[in-house]
Amino acid sequence: MVEVGPATFTMGNHEVPRWPADGEGPAREVQLSPFSISPTAVSNTEFARFVDATGHVTDAERFGWSFVFALALPDDAPATRSVVGAPWWRQVEGASWQHPSGPGSSVREVGDHPVVHVSHRDARLYCAWAGLRLPTEAEWECAARGGCSGARYPWGNELEPDGVAMCNIFRGEFPHRPSAGPDWEPTVAVDSFAPNGFGLHNMAGNVWEWCADWFDPRVADLGALSDPTGPGTGSHRVIRGGSYLCHDSYCDRYRVAARSSNAPDSSTANMGFRVASG
């Protein structure tokens, strides 16, 4: 775990919003008490220890299916329903954390990749077992910035300084052709790419990460500027960081101030979590 704070940082941004409904701004000064956060997202190997110890059955396993990116499916995958308006998302029977692309896939060879197909409930139960918790949204953004005040990304303002890739986002023609071609793999190891100023990996891209807060696009108006925890209730939980599917032509939410949400019982092939304490 990496210790952060106490800290005062600028949360959100003053940019003209590309996604007004996300509620990124305005920028405001937020104070945080000391906390600790894991340097990486929870990996498949770590989640497997939790399942072995508790017998936990994830929501995706209980429902019998989860969402998988179409290009991650094998060529002979059976036809399945897609999401209206986002046909690259496919409802795959048998997809779960152990089988990220459906029944024929396995995490056996990717133990160091982030666990996916986990709901907010799954993440909270893992935290309870480990004696930890999910980070608040404010803690997550402060940690993601890594002391790099006002920057667009955890490492600065350029997406690829000197042409060097700093995160795992979609490169190519979204959602059809990743530039890596047939060797393309959705996720990468949890400690891939250089860490930010606090020593944290993949705070942009790879997988979305659940936060503790309920989502509200008006969160900047809630008034709590010291250890904020978001609204008291809601229908969706905050997710942060973007994923391997983010692409500027469609979704540039791999920026530090960017935010999104998902229903607490939802699970997808690009959503995981990291843990916090304090």
Image: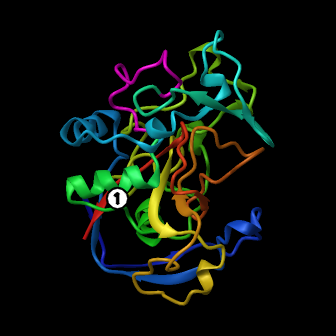
Residue 101 percent across, percent down from the top left: 53, 24
In reply to whether residue 29 is colored magenta, the answer given is: no
Q: Is the C terminus in the top left, top right, bottom left or bottom right quadrant?
A: bottom left
Residue at the bottom extreme, as displayed: 223
**In this picture, residue 255 sits left or right of residue 100:** right
In the image, residue 219 lies at what x, y percent? 59, 78
Q: Is residue 82 visible?
A: yes
Q: Measured along the vertical axis of the image, is residue 16 above or below residue 247?
A: below
Tell me which segment is drawn in magenta.
100-116
Q: Secondary structure at mark 1?
A: loop
Residue count near mark 1 (Cα–Cα under 10 Å), binned few <14, some 14–19, many ≥20: some
Tell me if residue 273 comes above or below residue 46 in the rendering: below
Query: Residue at left 60%, top 23%?
Result: 72
Which residue position holds label 1?
198
Question: What's the residue type where badge 1 is placed?
Answer: Phe
| Residue 116 in sight from this viewpoint | no
Q: Residue at x 64, y 70 (%)?
A: 24
| The N terminus - image quarter | bottom left
